[in-house]
Amino acid sequence: MTYEDIYDLVKSTRSTRRFKPGINISDLELKEIISVVSNTSSAKNMQPLKYITVTNKDLVKDISNNVTWAAHLRDWEQKEEEQPSAYIIILNDTNIDGFEMFDCGIALQTILLTAKIKGYDSCPLASIDKEQCRNIFSLPNHIKPILGIALGVACENVEIVKVKLDDTNYYRDENDSHCVPKRTTNEILIRTF
Ligand SMILES: Cc1cc2nc3c(=O)[nH]c(=O)nc-3n(C[C@H](O)[C@H](O)[C@H](O)COP(=O)(O)O)c2cc1C
């Protein structure tokens, strides 16, 4: 893999909220993604994170209906036919004394990139209904949902644009493309010694 490959992979891995209907993602594909995650770094190597994969159509629908999709887009709601094909839920095992939020970030990006390599688009979702997850997955008290990741194939165009007037809010342009303002390298690399 070259620098250009990783650059393009990360650049094309955008949060997607309008998915194509009729796309099936198999349990095996999701297991393969988790298999990649099992190799990632973990603070103190405690590995407190657990995962649940969801491809059952009724459950995908139930989870999707309770997510807050694109809170900044006040006049848009995800339609049922735009719902994702699958979910991965990241959970923290509180019986393990780890640093779950650091680990969760590493796991999240690993999942997003691996899914993209497999041809799937994604959206991280802090807004999944954790109580709903507790109920539908019959979770014991020490297993706490942290984050959901929606997976499917995009039926929207998502592109990176420049930040104007320090406004990083995403928006849809006149062509209905979802635009994500990103700060430039020179803005975020603040010192070079
Ligand atoms: C930890 C985390 C939680 C997020 N939760 C949500 C969410 O609940 N709903 C949503 O629509 N997007 C969610 N997002 C997606 C962000 O809105 C998105 O990353 C941001 O707009 C930048 O777009 P990009 O991912 O394409 O760079 C989340 C992203 C992260 C990293």
Image: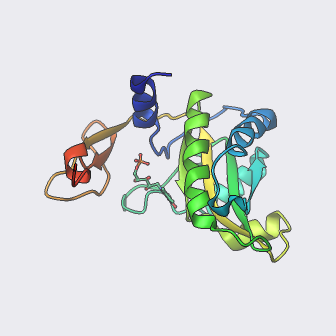
Work out whether residue 166 or residue 169 is closer to the camera in this orientation and state it.
166
Query: Is there any visible trace of residue 82 in the rendered image?
Result: no
Relative to 60, residue 117 above or below: above
Q: In x, y percent, where is residue 176?
A: 33, 40
**Residue in the image at 25% along x and 41% along y:** 161
Q: Nearer the viewer, residue 187 or 151?
A: 187
Q: Is residue 103 above or below residue 38?
A: below
Q: Is residue 61 above or below residue 86?
A: below
Q: Would you say 115 lies left or right of 11 here?
A: right
**Structure colour scheme:** rainbow
Corner quadrant of residue 99: bottom right
Residue under the image location 56 percent in, 42 percent down:
112
Q: What residue is shown at x 77% (from left), y 53% (from top)?
A: 52
- State left or right for residue 5 relative to residue 144: left
The structure residue drawn at horizontal position 75% and vertical position 54%, both measured from the top left corner, is 51
Of 82 and 168, nearer the camera is: 168
Residue 100 locus on image (x, y percent):
64, 66
